[in-house]
Image (spheres, rainbow, N blue to C red):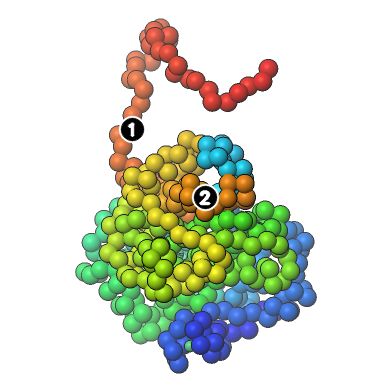
């Protein structure tokens, strides 16, 4: 039983069947999944959802599938962490972190979009999957293909260090390195997809892939007790996540399952911030930028859906902020020190931007704030660029330890007040 009605052009509204189409033949706009919402409303409600398994398929009626999913049974439903120590440090009353750094199995938000792209891709008859990526997307495609047994091909630009995709290589995908930049890789991928009939998750499967990003929005609302937060800070790379979380909130509101209105903020690295710079300059369009930042997984200079990010940020009365590389590193450390969560530079950029928005009083400190942490710090250890500094090196002997320890002052000062 399917709730998926078809695809619809985001620009001109022309309708298409939910097949292998991905661009509008009239205006070249992107196609988006459309659902039978009245049927969903009559057959589904929050109480039913709450009884389901804790993964992203608990929202399956709102996802573009006709039969059974094939992967993602442990993806999504990541923790919404109430960050009390960080909140106190920042002087805000209610701060939550949507922690996709522990998403399953590839430790980033990309497990969401790939779970849906592969499941729908199989329904559409694809038997080989592929993507153009230099990082988290490659990890996710390789992992989900490994567990479903489908062959996969990763296309990467040759100027990236192979170390970056080691985590993907371990599950033995085929990898094609192309002598060119990221744009050239992408262009070739759409030609190859057509020619061989392979499912490129972020190209010809894009209308289905992007729908997976909505699940982060559903989860935030459900985990807050079917309430929308007052403020939500999300990173922007290609621009999939932010408009799709906005769509999720809109759907839940239309279905009558949630209350509240969320101001949505886009976070980018200062070294690659086409969308946020356009917001700051009050422009109707963004100018592509040449990326120069340590936040590689969000360093997309010409984001495919950047215009939709600007649209949704403005519709929600939100804003955008950027973080410099030093600010990104500081935020990574602050998050680890206050909450024990280790994120990659994308998460650092998002938190650093959120902190600026709080300081600027764009975010009201007395209201509910959610910050999305989309990737894991263990994948980008080299970004930290610090020597592992230990306090001391000793021979393993009790007397030697005692001598050293008792000569120290303030070594283990606690910031926790224990009331006897
Ligand atoms: C891909 C990615 C994002 C968001 O990218 P969009 O293309 O804007 O959806 C954010 N953080 C990380 C770690 C990512 O890998
Ligand atoms: Zn169109």
Disc 1/disc 2 C-alpha distance (Å): 37 Å
* Residue 52: quarter of image: bottom right
Which quarter of the rendering shows the N terminus? bottom right
Position of the C terminus by quadrant: top right
Q: Is residue 130 visible?
A: no
For residue 274, above or below residue 88: below
Residue corresponding to mark 2: 361
The answer to which quarter of the image holds residue 93 is top right
Crowd rating for badge 2 (residues with CA inside 10 Å; few <14, some 14–19, many 20+): few
Quadrant of the image occupied by residue 63: bottom right
> Residue 28 in the image: x percent, y percent?
42, 86
Quick check: 341 above or below 181?
A: above
The structure residue drawn at horizontal position 56% and vertical position 89%, both measured from the top left corner, is 15
Toward the viewer: 308 or 22? 308
Q: Is residue 347 left or right of residue 95?
A: left
Q: Is mark 2 on a helix, strand or loop?
A: loop
- CA neighbours of label 1 inside 10 A, class few (<14), some (14 to 19), many (20+): few
């Amino acid at each position: 039983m399917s709730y998926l009605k078809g695809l619809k052009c985001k620009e001109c509204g022309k309708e298409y069947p939910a097949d292998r189409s991905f661009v509008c033949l009239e205006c070249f706009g992107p196609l988006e999944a459309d659902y039978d919402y009245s049927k969903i409303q009559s057959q589904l409600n929050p109480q039913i959802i709450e009884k389901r398994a804790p993964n992203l398929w608990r929202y399956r009626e709102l996802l573009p599938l006709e039969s059974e999913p094939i992967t993602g049974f442990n993806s999504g439903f990541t923790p919404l962490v109430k960050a009390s120590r960080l909140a106190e440090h920042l002087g805000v009353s209610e701060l939550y972190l949507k922690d996709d750094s522990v998403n399953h199995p590839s430790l980033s938000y990309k497990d969401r979009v790939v779970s849906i792209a592969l499941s729908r891709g199989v329904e559409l008859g694809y038997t080989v999957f592929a993507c153009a990526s230099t990082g988290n997307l490659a990890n996710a495609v390789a992992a989900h293909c490994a567990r479903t047994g489908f062959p996969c091909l990763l296309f990467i630009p040759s100027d990236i260090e192979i170390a970056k995709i080691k985590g993907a290589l371990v599950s033995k995908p085929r990898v094609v390195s192309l002598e060119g930049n990221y744009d050239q890789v992408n262009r070739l991928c759409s030609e190859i997809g057509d020619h061989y009939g392979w499912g490129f998750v972020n190209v010809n499967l894009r209308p289905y892939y992007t729908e997976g990003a909505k699940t982060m929005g559903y989860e935030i609302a459900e985990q807050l007790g079917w309430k929308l937060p007052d403020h939500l800070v999300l990173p922007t790379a290609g621009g999939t996540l932010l408009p799709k979380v906005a769509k999720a909130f809109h759907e839940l509101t239309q279905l009558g399952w949630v209350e509240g209105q969320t101001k949505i903020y886009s976070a980018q690295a200062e070294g690659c911030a086409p969308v946020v710079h356009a917001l700051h300059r009050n422009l109707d369009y963004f100018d592509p930028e040449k990326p120069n930042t340590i936040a590689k997984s969000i360093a997309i200079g010409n984001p495919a859906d950047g215009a939709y990010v600007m649209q949704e940020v403005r519709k929600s009365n939100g804003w955008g902020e950027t973080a410099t590389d030093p600010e990104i590193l500081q935020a990574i450390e602050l998050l680890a020190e206050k909450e024990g969560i280790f994120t990659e530079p994308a998460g650092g950029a998002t938190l650093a931007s959120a902190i600026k928005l709080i300081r600027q009083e764009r975010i009201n400190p007395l209201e509910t704030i959610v910050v999305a942490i989309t990737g894991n710090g263990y994948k980008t250890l080299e970004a930290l660029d610090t020597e592992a500094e230990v306090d001391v090196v000793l021979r393993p002997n009790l007397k030697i330890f005692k001598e050293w320890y008792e000569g120290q002052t303030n070594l283990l000062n606690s910031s926790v007040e224990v009331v006897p």
